[in-house]
Image: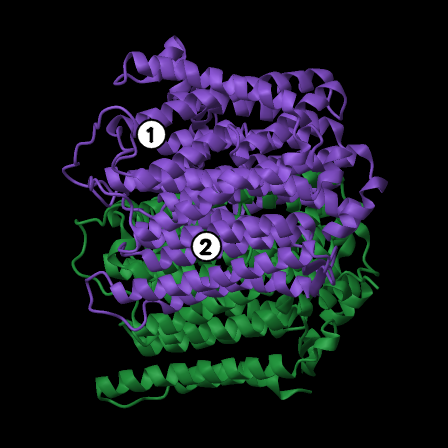
Amino acid sequence: MTVTLAAAITLLPFLASAAGLLGSRWPRGAPGTPDKAAARRAAWIAILPAAVSAVLAGWLALRWWGGARDTTAGTLTIIDTGGLPISVGLEVTELSVLVGLLVTVVALAVQVYSVGYLGDDRRYPSYSAFISLFTSAMLLVIYAGDLLVLYAGWEIMGLCSYLLIGHWWEDLGNSRAAIKAFLVTRLGDVGFLFGIFVLGVGAGSFRIADVLARFPQMSTATLIVATLLLLAGVAGKSAQVPLHTWLPDAMAGPTPISALIHAATMVAAGIFMVARLFPVFEAAGPTLDVLAVLAALGMLGAALAALAQDDLKRVLAYSTISQLAYMAAALAAGDDEAAIFHLVSHGAFKALLFLCAGAVIHAVGSNLMSDMGGLRRIMPITFVTMTIGFAALVGLPPASGFFSKDAVLVAVEQASAEGPLTDAAAWLLYACALATVAVTGAYATRAWLRTFFGERRVVALPEPEPGTAHVFTAHEAPLSMRVPLVVLAVPALLFGFVGLGDMHWGTAAVSVALALLGAGITYSAWRSDPLADPARLLGPFRVPCEQAFYVDTAYHAIFVRPVLRLARVVVGTDDGVVDGAVRGSGRLTLGAAGLLRFAQNGNVQLYVSGLLAGVLLIAVGAVMFG
Amino acid sequence: MSWIPIALLTVPLAGALLLLAPGPTRPETRARLLRAYGLGVSGITFVLALVLALTFDYGDAGRMQFTTDQSWIPGLDLRFHLGVDGISLPLIVLTTLLTLLCFVYLTGTRNERPRALSCTLLVLEVGMIGTFLALDLLLFFVFFEVVLIPMYFVIAIWGGQGRRAAAIKFILYTVLGSVVLLLGLLLIWAQTGTLDMVALAQAHGSGMARSVQIVAFVAIGIGLAVKTPMWPLHTWLPDAHTEAPTVGSVLLAGVLLKMGTYGFARIAIPVLPEGAAAVAPWLGAFAVVGIIYGALACLAQRDLKRMIAYSSVGHMGFVLLGFATLTPVGINAALFGNVAHGLITGLLFFLAGAVKERYGTADMPTLGGGMLGRLPRMGSLLTFACVASLGLPGLAGFWGEMLALLGAYEPGAGLSRPLYLTFMAIGGIGTVLTAAYFLVMLSKVTHGPPAKTSGGLMADVRGYELAAWVPLVALILLFGLWPKALLLITTPAVQTLLGAP
């Protein structure tokens, strides 16, 4: 029963996406005009299954914690590959029940919100269908009972991310951002796939339950290799250093997508995967060290980058990288429960922040904070809900982030005393985690002040850019956008109380003090000159922070350009070798009467082919018998 | 003796011969009749293949079924020996399907000398089906060669600007390969005294010294590798594809390339196991070089058709890598990749042909961008085909590549593991590069503001095009979501082929 529910939760959005892609434009309206009826049909096709999925996920959770845990695993079929079989099946665990609930609720909120945000877009039907497909793929990752089934969902999420970032493909910048997101994550996914091979072949099965049961018999070296390879996929999907560069660019997509995919769910998939296989990672100490160092660098670096951005969505994107690094830190410190706690609370408050940012951007018609200001009077509901979101991000009580960040900090603190990490890694992680708390307070306050306070700097744009469908309207967001804000504000504010019993008030006091320190510095800088950007406090480091420490530039120089140059060389060789050989053979034929006949027929290619084949024959023969 | 394989050969052959008879004189009647005729003959052939697939005994897919064994030329020891097993069945159905879809596509396009084209395509079909049915080495070779002549004419008569040079290059290259192939086959015959593939495969190389097996494998391998094509013997392919008409490209990529890889699975590996074990590392090395080389060449291409042609070099690299692992999973991967590539690249060439027909060019900078705006359905289909081709899970292209890499992770007994791990890693990088060139191409062609320069108002996907493409889309989805449909058939056959218990 349990697993049947999970299958239904996963399949419903998939069917919705198929129906939405094929069916929503039929019957067709008048050609040339935006088809209102199609958009309405598409909205129903998308929202109803998402709602049913969310209700079922809620029921599953109630049943689960009510104690009804019958048949948690089910296999549809076993694919015999000639080697290790693939079992197409699902498995429900406590972790997947929780994360599944998060995903379905956020997905439903985003689907509803999108009607207001993009409902009059010409391509809304395909857009909502891609969100449905994404939801289904994410749920497949969550409930998968087999590593390769998980991988299938993992990659399909990547495709949906590509399609949705490139939603406004008229602008080639968006198209480039989409390509970058797909390729960077795919690079990580190659490692991920190889990690699955190592783990699956080592355990003799790709089933996650079997892997978890049999990994103690595997050698430590195998485990380290496997987990490090898996970590590559995690770094790609969860935008961790060194594969984090795609996420800020991915903000080119519509804001609901940033909320759903690039904040609440897909980027959390990497963290989820580590938590799912956590016993395996715990047995591979060096991997956790690597994870700790990457998390430490990522959280502080991304927070500093967030402090210097002018684009509101990029601020939130870097903050996502930073917060995901907190989750990774908790995992590295050996506390997967703290990581998942922060994952769920972050999923709620970051989705809320993005949807609020979307409402602001929708109203202002610009992503840049230098175009905003003074919006608290015009958009009171957005102001209140976004304030809750920022409070949760900074970790101020009683918002959910206060509790979940405390859990993470406690885990890291304990790891520096005792735990799987080496001392150096643990202390680096602890120091960076505390420093990041202060920087988080600073950048959140800066964004909050520059958006909602001070003078209104809004100027109506003369011509709406692609991606900003509206010029300044000076109105609160429409109802379909306000409702998801309020709905998400509730868990962002209150979800943390489930962790009330496990609070460490000493750590919490330190963290709140640090956050307030960061916020206070920003506030005083802003207070002295409300029109100037508080980022000026960074002084000479401002530009490097704004450029995210030039990682993108470096990657471009190290990877992209050489590959393109190599590609041109290959094309040159491919033409050159053939042409060159043809020219050379033309000279040779003068001396070879037999071959001259071919030349006269214009059949020099025969000679070239013969030459190539002969050389290869001789070469292979020499190697074989030599 | 079974009638279906013979009918599969005689129906298109009789259809081609009948076209030589004079038809009605009025041009319109003739054109209409010809369209219906081509559809009819290829349709009947496809139905026959479906009957074959439906009556096939899946419980025993490793055994040769529907066999026919008649003496043909006793002096040469040549026998008319046909049969079907789990390896050839998917390819036969694929061949008849693609031929039918080509005829469906032809109903909507105008061609010069349509009767000759129909006749040529039907002869081509005879050769292709025969190659996959033949169980006698010499008979296999005969059908293998029969294919070349009609394909030469398809390129040379109905091709583009540089068709003559491309056609000559195609025929000389492949004939040269065939010569080497024939030498290898004759070497097997001289050593064992039989041409019967089933008997030879059951013998698993007994009766042939290791050195003989190696020489024979290299000779046969080169002959097949030209057709596949394997780097560095691929240079005929881009020209042939660029110049060939759409239906020619589709059949060339969809079926002809498969004949090379099929030869590895049917002859080279089972008949010469020791030769295979000795040469496999080389095969694997050429395969992964081909993957990277093909991907890099694609990245810098300007011409859409040429790019898809080079992408075949990369994809066939994965197929060859699967064979080179000499494991059941690797050979399964190769057979799966074969069928998937036939469907996906067939669709890609159909689309490229339709683009070229509308824009008058396949040069990407001239095409401009914004196809999703001008021709939304065409752009969407192109996106779908590219995504399938770059190996997304859930679509057919994924399983072949993934299983080939899995095979390389654990290569067959006696093969160097570190070497194959290197192959696996290089193949993995190849998948990233593959994604890169397809996405860059999509960005150039389908994204961006719609180009205002070339062409006037264009029709989006037309009815006959949809009819020709939808079956491919459906099958790509089917095999992607339910790979068991294909693996179920190939796995027992592969076990038999490798002599596994």
Give the CA separation, mark 2 to mark 1. Answer: 27 Å
**On the image, which quarter does residue A521 sit in?**
top left
Image point (40%, 82%), residue name: B39
Give the answer, above or below, for where B439 lies relative to B254. above
- Quadrant placement of the N terminus of chain B: bottom right
Q: Which chain is green?
A: B
State whether discs 2 and 1 lie on one chain: yes
The residue at which mark 2 appears reads as A108
Q: Residues within 10 Å of mark 1 (few under 14, many from 20)?
A: some
Q: Residue furthest left?
A: A462
Chain identifier of the residue bearing label 2 in the image: A
Q: Is residue A553 left or right of residue B494?
A: left
Q: Is residue A457 visible?
A: yes
The residue at which mark 1 appears reads as A311
Q: Position of residue A453 (x, y in %)?
A: 29, 26
Give the answer, above or below, for where A141 lies relative to B195. above
